[in-house]
Image (cartoon, helix red, strand yellow):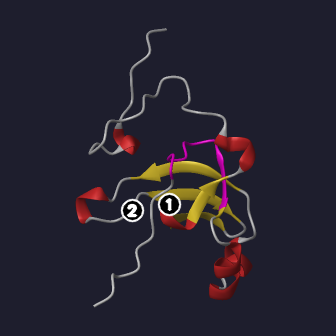
């Protein structure tokens, strides 16, 4: 029996304001997603936690047809966003904790 194909999550979860692109543009083109949503890059509006259901985190993106939620497994950070790191006020989560829900309060 062969192992089922699985898609790995993004190495670093995108944060609102960062830009992402299709992880595999050829596959996005073949499925018609590029024609529907656009070629990217896309700005992340917010992230949606689906870990309760065993699903990948959803990224709500600004696309050609408006804001749409796309699972993180189909996206990757753009080269310019990859070096940005974590926005101020956020902290990376430890393994087993969904980073989408971790926020450190910053005193102003």
Q: Position of residue 70 (x, y in %)?
A: 52, 66
Q: Which residue is situated farthest in the left direction here?
A: 52
Left or right: residue 35 compared with residue 7: right
- Residue 56 image label: 2
Using the numbered discs, state the Cα–Cα distance from disc 2 to disc 1 in whole angstroms: 6 Å
Main secondary structure along the magenta-highlighted residues: loop
Where residue 36 sits, quadrant-wise, is: bottom right
From the viewer's side, name the closer residue of 14 and 94. 94
Q: Which residues are magenta?
A: 11-21
Residue 90: give x, y in percent of width and height. 46, 28
Nearest to the observer: residue 28 or residue 36: 28
Q: Report the residue at 68% width, 70% height from top.
A: 65
Q: Is residue 18 magenta?
A: yes
Q: Is 40 placed left or right of 45 in the picture?
A: right
Residue at the disc numbered 1: 72
Give yes or no for contact between labels 2 and 1 (Cβ–Cβ under 8 Å).
yes
């Amino acid at each position: 029996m062969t192992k089922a194909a699985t898609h790995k999550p993004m190495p670093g979860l995108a944060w609102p304001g960062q830009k992402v692109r299709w992880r595999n543009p050829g596959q996005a083109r073949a499925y018609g997603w590029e024609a529907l949503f656009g070629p990217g890059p896309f700005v992340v509006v917010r992230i949606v936690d689906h870990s309760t259901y065993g699903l990948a985190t959803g990224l709500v993106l600004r696309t050609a047809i408006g804001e749409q939620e796309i699972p993180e497994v189909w996206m990757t950070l753009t080269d310019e966003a990859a070096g940005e790191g974590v926005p101020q006020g956020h902290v990376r989560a430890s393994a087993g904790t969904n980073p989408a829900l971790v926020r450190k309060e910053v005193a102003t």
